[in-house]
Amino acid sequence: AGAKDDTFNVLDLAEYTKNRPWWRRMFAPSSGSSAEKYNVATQLVIGGVTGWCTGFLFQKVGKLAATAVGGGFFLLQIANHTGYIKVDWNLIQRDMNKAKQQLKFHTSGDKMPPEVKSRVDEVVIFLKKNAILTGGFAGGFMFGMAS
């Protein structure tokens, strides 16, 4: 009465790992990435093309932004030198001290706020789930920045 049934299912790990891609075994054993329905070459091409486009646009926008900021700074210096603008250095010094105090207050604790930590965790999970696509994107981004 009440005898215990001690039967176990045997899992053949060799067969189990044959059906799973190596990057899933290594990075994310339970990933269900939508990119994994494509083969490795397709993932690399998709990541590379999107990375190149992003890098190319980043390079062009970066040059434009640097030119605008530099030109604006140059014009402000000319306006200050010719007397069109008077700078209240005491007000700037007071505001800088206030900003330093705020930075010291917010960075006094060495831990990240929970909303930042959750976003970082989401990014890490995404990168693990899409290792091939991410690698292609990174390579394409570098090529886009160089072209």
Image: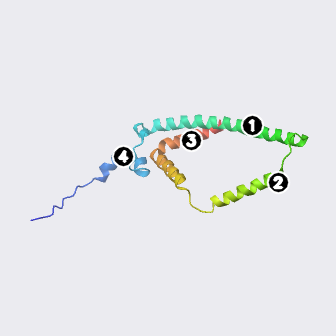
Q: Which mark is residue 139?
A: 3
- Which is more foreground, mark 2 or mark 3? 2
The tag earlier along the polypeptide, 1 or 4, is 4
Residue at image coords 54%, 35% = 50
> Going from the N terminus, do you reach mark 2 or mark 3 first?
2
10 Å crowding of disc 4: few (<14), some (14-19), many (20+): few
Horizontal side of residue 38 vs 77, given as left or right: left
User: Is 147 on the left-hand or right-hand side of 20?
Assistant: right
What residue do we see at 31% from left, 49% from top? 16
Give whichever of discs 3 and 1 has the lower sequence position: 1
Looking at the image, which residue is at 21% across and 58% down? 8
Q: Residues within 10 Å of mark 1 (few under 14, many from 20)?
A: few
How far is disc 2 from disc 3 in space, using C-alphas? Answer: 48 Å
- Whole-number angstrom distance, CA of label 1 to CA of label 4: 51 Å
The disc labelled 2 sits on which kind of residue?
Asn
Residue 28 at x, y percent in the picture:
42, 50
Amino acid found under the numbered disc labelled 4: Arg
Closer to us: 106 or 43: 106
Q: Earlier in the sequence, mark 1 or mark 2?
A: 1
Query: Where is mark 1, residue-wise?
Result: 68
Q: Secondary structure at mark 2?
A: helix
The answer to the question of whether label 4 and label 3 lie on touching residues, with beta carbons closer than 8 A, is no
Mark 4 and mark 3: span between their CA atoms? 25 Å
Mark 1 or 2: in front is 2
- Image point 75% across, 40% down: which residue? 69
